[in-house]
Image (spheres, grey):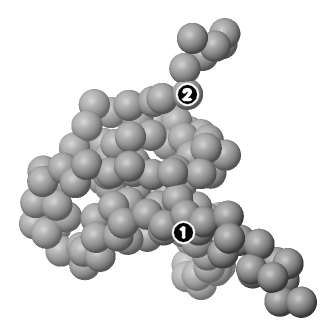
């Protein structure tokens, strides 16, 4: 076993399960769902695991959208949407699916994007187009 902290995290695993059914979601939305289904954690912890998931390729940044409205801090809010990454291994927990259906979320179960073979990677980079 390598030295240091283990890479695996139960919080990140639960976030991956939520993203599996949502398709894509932003931090606050994921935190609200997470705290309804699992032992409560802080939003800071959720955002930490979203960023850590990006580094481990389990979670990908999808889009950053600006939404206008009347918020206590101003007129706009920036929502960073996340999806499953290539290294994600969701199990498909049914209690998450049931919760999301019950609360009116549109479900878009999404499997992680498949990894390309080395040949396809090289082909895309133009090494076999000569």
Examine the rendered structure and indicate whether residue 125 appears above or below residue 87: below
The residue that label 1 is drawn on is 81
The residue that label 2 is drawn on is 7
Q: Is residue 111 left or right of residue 21?
A: right
Q: Which structural element holds mark 1?
A: strand
Examine the rendered structure and indicate whether residue 118 appears above or below residue 16: below
For image coordinates 16% across by 61% down, the residue present is 97
Q: Quadrant of residue 115?
A: bottom right
Which quadrant of the rendered structure holds the C terminus? Answer: bottom right
The residue nearer to you, when weighing 35 against 56, is 56
Q: Quadrant of residue 94?
A: bottom left
Query: Which percent across, then down, holds residue 8?
Result: 48, 29
Pointers 1 and 2 in contact (C-beta within 8 Å)? no
Q: Is residue 103 left or right of residue 47?
A: left
Examine the rendered structure and indicate whether residue 124 appears above or below residue 58: below
Query: Which percent across, then down, holds residue 121?
Result: 71, 71
Query: Which percent across, then down, holds residue 16?
Result: 39, 51
For image coordinates 33% across by 61% down, the residue present is 20
The label shown at residue 29 is: none
Say which label, 1 or 2, has the lower sequence index: 2
The residue nearer to you, when weighing 107 against 114, is 114
Asked if one can make out residue 72 in the rendered structure from this viewpoint, the answer is: no
Real-space CA distance between mark 1 and mark 2, rounded to the nearest whole angstrom: 23 Å
Which quadrant of the rendered structure holds the N terminus? Answer: top right
Query: Which percent across, then down, holds residue 68?
Result: 59, 84
Q: Quadrant of residue 119?
A: bottom right
Q: Is residue 30 left or right of residue 46?
A: left
The residue at the far bottom in this view is: 130
Tell us which disc is closer to us: 1 or 2.
2
For image coordinates 41% across by 35% down, the residue present is 11
């Amino acid at each position: 076993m390598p030295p240091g902290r283990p890479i695996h995290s139960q919080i990140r695993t639960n976030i991956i399960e939520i993203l599996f059914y949502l398709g894509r979601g932003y931090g606050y939305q994921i935190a609200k769902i997470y705290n309804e289904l699992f032992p409560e954690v802080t939003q800071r912890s959720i955002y930490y695991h979203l960023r850590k998931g990006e580094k481990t390729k389990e979670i990908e940044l999808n889009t950053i959208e600006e939404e206008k409205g009347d918020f206590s801090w101003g007129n706009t809010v920036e929502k960073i949407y996340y999806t499953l990454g290539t290294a994600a291994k969701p199990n498909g927990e049914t209690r998450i699916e049931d919760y999301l259906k019950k609360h009116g979320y549109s479900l878009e179960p999404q499997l992680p994007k498949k990894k390309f073979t080395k040949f396809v990677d090289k082909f895309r980079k133009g090494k076999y187009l000569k």
